[in-house]
Image (cartoon, grey):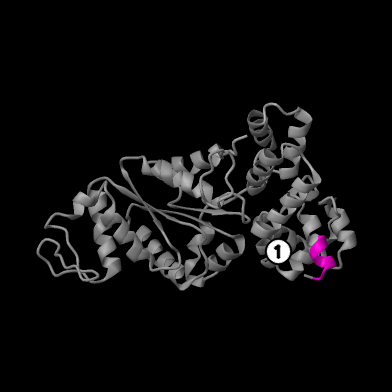
Amino acid sequence: MVNLFDLTFGKLPNNFLSRDNLISEICYDFCSEVPSSNLYVISGVRGSGKTVLLNKVHNMMSEETDWVTVKVNPDRDILEQIAANIYESESVKHLFLKPSFSFSFHGLTFSIDGKTPISNIKSLLEKMLIHLKKHNKKLLVSIDEVTNSKEMKSFAHDFQSFLGDGYEIFLLMTGLYENIHSLQNNKTLTFLYRAPKIYLEPLDLIDVFNSYKKIFSNEDESVIKKLTLLTNGYAYAYQLLGSLFTKEEKITDKLLEDYDKKLKDYCYDKIYDNIPTSELSLLKVIPENGKCTSKYIVENCSMSIKQISVLKDRLIKRGILKNQKGVFEILLPRFRNFISINEEFDI
């Protein structure tokens, strides 16, 4: 059987379970006459589909004739990348080849309406934004996996300045909860607190079930249901388990061993390493089945109710824990078992 699943992080899979509501929310707001926000932040645990969602929105906006879209690396000078990408964009490059618009940068010297050449990258980008606005063009900048780096802090300051000056610039970025939290904690970047944040939830299990049922059409529904529950809606697990089942064609001990190992190697090791000790202590209180009531946690945890409340909130924002009607559940499939193994071997 042909494998329809893709395990490459960030790549839009051939078999993609769309989050249409989130995609529509972001695109609709950006394209509104008066957007409620020029910035959206997508956050979630590793493997939850942040990059795929960013790429989907970015690609859809790229198809709009009045938009210029650029992707940049958060670890390099961001303004330089934006300016270079705009200049090289096929849809607007002709706007910057005229004698009236020129600049001095990286060895290339031009002039704007005969005035002194510009050497400051921020001033250059401002001129480009003005020029784009004259031609009814808007700019979308997409940044994947941001951190609290000097490059991001510098760009965040500039972005806030661009907004204040009324430029048509929009920003879509993804990041782990702890990195977003660290970045917005800078005293001069408080506007990030007000930015809409999308915390990615698990995929809808009905969508997972229907997708597996369509792909594995010869399988009994009980098998499809078991596959679906094994993913718990975790985006990477959906792709991984689908790929493994394509090869095995049945749920075996070997399949489950491979499933656990690949979850560990590609996701859980890194997720586990980034969870603070205090939050990890709370997760260890939760029973092996990964579910319990709030009362159970309070009764079995040697922390105050206030401490527990803070830690639960952080774990929920990380995308690791869910609270539904007073019942707490670890969202990552078989992650509680992974924690137990690590604890047993003192890893």
Q: Quadrant of the C terminus?
A: bottom right
Q: Nearer the viewer, residue 275 or 252?
A: 252
Name the one closer to the observer, 79 or 167: 79
In the image, 116: left or right of 205? Answer: left
Local secondary structure at mark 1? helix
Give the residue type at disc 1.
Tyr
Is 144 left, or right, of 89 in this rendering? right
Q: Could you say where residue 131 lies in the image, as x and y percent from the top left?
A: 23, 53
Kindly give the residue lying farthest to the left in the view shown.
114
For the point 50% across and 41% down, the residue is: 23
Horizontal and vertical percent position of residue 318: 65, 57
Q: In the image, is residue 228 above or below residue 284? A: above
Q: Number of labelled discs?
A: 1
Q: Is residue 165 visible?
A: no
Give, as a single range, the part of the protein colored magenta: 340-346
Of residues 283 and 160, the one drawn nearer to the viewer in this rendering: 283
In what quadrant of the picture does the N terminus appear? top right
Q: How many C-alpha atoms fall within 10 Å of the one at disc 1: few (<14), some, or many (≥20)?
A: some
Task: Tell me if residue 121 comes above or below residue 297 in the rendering.
Answer: below
What residue is drawn where x is 59% and y is 36%? Answer: 2
Asked where in the image residue 299 lies, by quadrant, the reply is bottom right
Q: Position of residue 279 (x, y in %)?
A: 74, 65
Q: Residue 294, position in %: x, y?
A: 83, 53
Q: Determine which residue is flagged by label 1.
A: 272
User: Could you tell me what secondary structure mostly forms the magenta stretch?
Assistant: helix
Q: Is residue 150 magenta?
A: no
- Residue 170 visible within the image: yes
In the picture, measured across the screen, residue 17 lies left or right of residue 226, that is left
| Quadrant housing residue 210 | top right
Displayed quadrant of residue 29: top left
265 displayed left or right of 290: left
